[in-house]
Amino acid sequence: KPPQALPLYHNAQQIKQRAYQLAQQTLANETKRHTQLSVRQVADEQQNEDVTLVTTDTHNPKAVAFIEFGQHAREQITSEVAYHLVEALALGERAELWSWASTKRAMTRRRGRWVPSELGQALRDVSIALLPVSGLSGRRRADAGEFCLRHDGNTDPNRNFPTGWRHEDGSEGEQPLSIPASRLSIKAFEQVRNTTMGAGRDDVYTAYINVHSGEWSVYTPWDHKTTVSDRLSPWADHVISRLDMQCRCTVGGGGAVSGYLAFGSAMDHMHTAYGA
């Protein structure tokens, strides 16, 4: 039987259904007071698997943020964050999370101004794309009772990307992109990037964010080296320092500050292959 606390989390199917429901609500909202959402399935050609992709309909954005959740099956709380983030995008200040005392404490600025009042302004310039549950195959098993499961079968999705990939302990897969989770992550990212940066645009800043649970940290490339990438945006240090004010995290290059190297990670690949 599931642990008593598990009903507090929505399962993968419920998260998918809620995304489609909210997208329909924003489509029917004639006043266009809140962010318009689009939801679609991204399918893997090699196996019968797909993932749900949620995007904001932002006209002519200056930047796109691609945020991936639930890459590891047991990190269910990350997909729960995605669930509430989609609600916040669709419902604005009517979303449940804004009623939580902890949200108010964390998100109220020093000058006493509420963050929700500033979201509309920011979202006019930024297109947001979310994969609420990217490791769907493993997540289904976790939802069914395998609560400690990390991998997709015998493969760690966050060790199965081409950049920095190498044979280690077997969890990296037989070869890069050997499982649907890693292939679908790239396919979804490319769809978002190609849509946002269509018509030859090369002036759109692209950010890739991979959300995990289990430690207080904010990592930047590289995961598979002990050095920090020299191709990061000039804004990276500023953004990370601002995040650190909230979470007091371990921050910096993943391989440099985490105490271990991660070969074949999604972050390193998105940074190398697409300049994210």
Image (cartoon, helix red, strand yellow):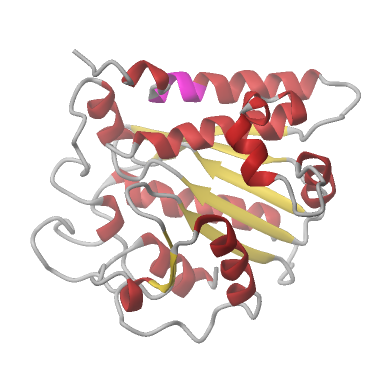
Q: Is residue 222 above or below residue 46?
A: below
Task: Please state which of residues 165 and 241 is positioned toward the viewer in this rendering.
Answer: 241
Which residue is at 25% across, 35% downward? 138
Tell me the quarter of the picture where residue 38 sits. top right
Q: Position of residue 86 (x, y in %)?
A: 61, 33
| Range of magenta residues | 12-16
Quadrant where the N terminus lies? top left
**Is 5 inside the magenta-drawn segment?**
no
Q: Is residue 140 above or below residue 187?
A: above
Q: Is residue 194 above or below residue 29?
A: below
Q: Is residue 246 left or right of residue 51?
A: right
Which residue is at 46% across, 32% downward? 80
Residue that protrudes farthest toward the right in the picture: 31
Q: Position of residue 119 (x, y in %)?
A: 78, 44
Q: Is residue 34 left or right of residue 150?
A: right
Quadrant where the C terminus lies? bottom right
Q: Position of residue 218 (x, y in %)?
A: 45, 63
Q: Position of residue 271 (x, y in %)?
A: 48, 71
Secondary structure mainly formed by the magenta segment: helix
Q: Is residue 207 left or right of residue 216?
A: right
Which residue is at 36% across, 71% downward? 254
